């Protein structure tokens, strides 16, 4: 049984919030609804901390969904109490947040070739399938791959008017809005730019784009820990980072550096977790066999060692590579082990974002200065 978000919202319109005089959706108490098959997560914001009000709201949601949508639905209700307006705190966001974008997730890897862009594209389409509004910024200036992976190589962003300003309209496919330097270069053209020019191009794609309302903007960062990463974190208050690695030691050593970069006191971007790509190989003719070609559970052990969440593993499967090459991310294939693997990982990412937003203050964009030829990072 696959539940639809529209059906859930219609059911919630039958509930009146105590003291509001309006239904739960109209009053704004329903902040988000997420569906995964027969599972439903409802995020509520109430104006009173009274225990009986919270309990009544939870019971009413469960009853409405079971009566009006599906009696066997697995429902989880998250209730947050909206605090009264307070004076600005030292933790308030600095930098240039993008209006309309709720969460900005950086997907990084310490090393190239671990499948970071493949993971990012599949996370994006899975989030879109779950009903979120999703954007993807291909921030790998020197090796852009999003246009190929989304089958939009020949597309070019158009200019649209937003108020009195001209903005780039992202290319959209599979429910994901995409911008990449690959849209502005020829396939055989190498991008030979110094850091400041690359940073300027990125800033244009970030701030001169008509992204609209997004629940998630995924940043597909280049491999390593260099100038582009600092420029991104200088420009944007990033909600959190996901690090992708394969299980072998040489990749894990660089993934460790990637996590350390985000965790530096001067940067302080929450690490949502680590994803292990190419975890094992299962031949099509031997579906019950697993061959750990690059090592076994290396990224899982690294996550435990660094005390960050392990978000899941993705097998080494030929169809994932083939799907990326033809521009249709593998997670779009229905009723397959690959779809299930990416759904589980995406659920974990969403849950870690919820945990991060509930328990941590907003991330600050860092300030960067240059002294004696070296980049120094400051708050």
Image (spheres, rainbow, N blue to C red):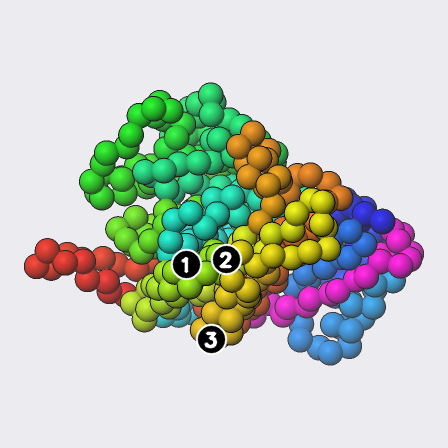
Query: Mark 2–mark 1 contact, CB under 8 Å?
Result: yes
Q: Earlier in the sequence, mark 1 or mark 3?
A: 1
Query: Dot 1 lies on which element?
Result: helix
Among the 4 quarters of the image, the one containing residue 352: bottom right
Q: Nearer the viewer, mark 1 or mark 3?
A: 1
Depicted 91 relative to depicted 168: above or below: below
In the picture, measured across the screen, residue 315 lies left or right of residue 257, that is: right
Query: Dot 3 lies on which element?
Result: helix
Where does label 2 land, which residue? 294
Query: Mark 3–mark 2 contact, CB under 8 Å?
Result: no
Q: Residue at x 32, y 71 (%)?
A: 265
Q: Nearer the viewer, mark 3 or mark 2?
A: 2
Depth check, front residue: 252 or 334 = 252
Q: Is residue 117 magenta?
A: no
Q: Residue at x 11, y 59 (%)?
A: 371
Where does label 3 land, which residue? 305
- Residue lying furthest left: 372
Where does label 1 land, which residue? 251
Q: Is residue 69 magenta?
A: yes
Give neighbour class at mark 3: few <14, some 14-19, many 20+ (Cα, 10 Å): few
- Whole-number angstrom distance, CA of label 1 to CA of label 3: 15 Å
Residue 271 location, x and y as percent?
46, 64
For the C terminus, the quadrant is: bottom left
Residue 199 location, x and y as percent?
27, 43
Query: Dot 2 lies on which element?
Result: loop
Q: Which residues are magenta?
A: 64-84
């Amino acid at each position: 049984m696959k539940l639809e978000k529209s059906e859930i919202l219609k059911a919630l319109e039958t509930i009146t919030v105590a003291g509001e005089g309006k239904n739960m959706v109209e009053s704004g108490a329903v902040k988000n609804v997420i569906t995964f098959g027969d599972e439903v997560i409802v995020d509520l914001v109430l104006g009173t901390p009274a225990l009986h009000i919270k309990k009544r709201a939870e019971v009413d949601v469960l009853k409405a969904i079971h009566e009006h949508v599906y009696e066997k639905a697995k429902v989880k209700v998250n209730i947050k109490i909206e605090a009264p307006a307070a004076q600005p705190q030292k933790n308030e966001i600095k930098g240039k947040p993008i209006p309309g974008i709720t969460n900005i997730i950086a997907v990084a890897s310490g090393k190239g070739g671990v499948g970071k862009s493949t993971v990012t594209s599949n996370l994006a389409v899975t989030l879109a399938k779950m009903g979120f509004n999703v954007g993807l910024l291909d921030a790998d200036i020197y090796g852009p791959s999003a246009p190929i992976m989304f089958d939009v190589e020949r597309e070019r962003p158009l200019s649209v008017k937003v108020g009195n300003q001209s903005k780039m309209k992202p290319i959209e496919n599979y429910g994901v809005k995409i911008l990449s330097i690959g849209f502005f270069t020829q396939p055989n053209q190498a991008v030979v730019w110094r850091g400041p020019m690359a940073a300027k191009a990125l800033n244009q794609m970030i701030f001169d784009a008509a992204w609209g309302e997004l629940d998630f903007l995924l940043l597909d960062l280049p491999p390593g820990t260099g100038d582009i990463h600092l420029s991104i974190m200088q420009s944007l208050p990033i909600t959190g980072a996901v690090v992708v690695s394969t299980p072998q030691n040489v990749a894990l050593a660089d993934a460790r550096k990637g996590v350390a970069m985000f965790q530096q006191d001067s940067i302080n971007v929450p690490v949502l977790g680590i994803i292990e790509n190419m975890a094992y190989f299962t031949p099509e003719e031997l579906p019950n066999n697993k061959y750990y070609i690059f090592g076994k559970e290396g990224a899982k052990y690294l996550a435990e060692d660094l005390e960050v969440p392990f978000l899941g593993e993705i097998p080494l499967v030929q169809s994932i590579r083939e799907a990326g090459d033809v521009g249709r991310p593998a997670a779009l294939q229905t009723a397959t082990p690959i779809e299930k693997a990416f759904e589980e990982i995406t659920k974990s990412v969403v849950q870690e974002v919820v945990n991060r937003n509930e328990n941590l203050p907003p991330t600050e964009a860092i300030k960067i200065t240059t002294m004696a030829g070296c980049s120094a990072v400051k708050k």
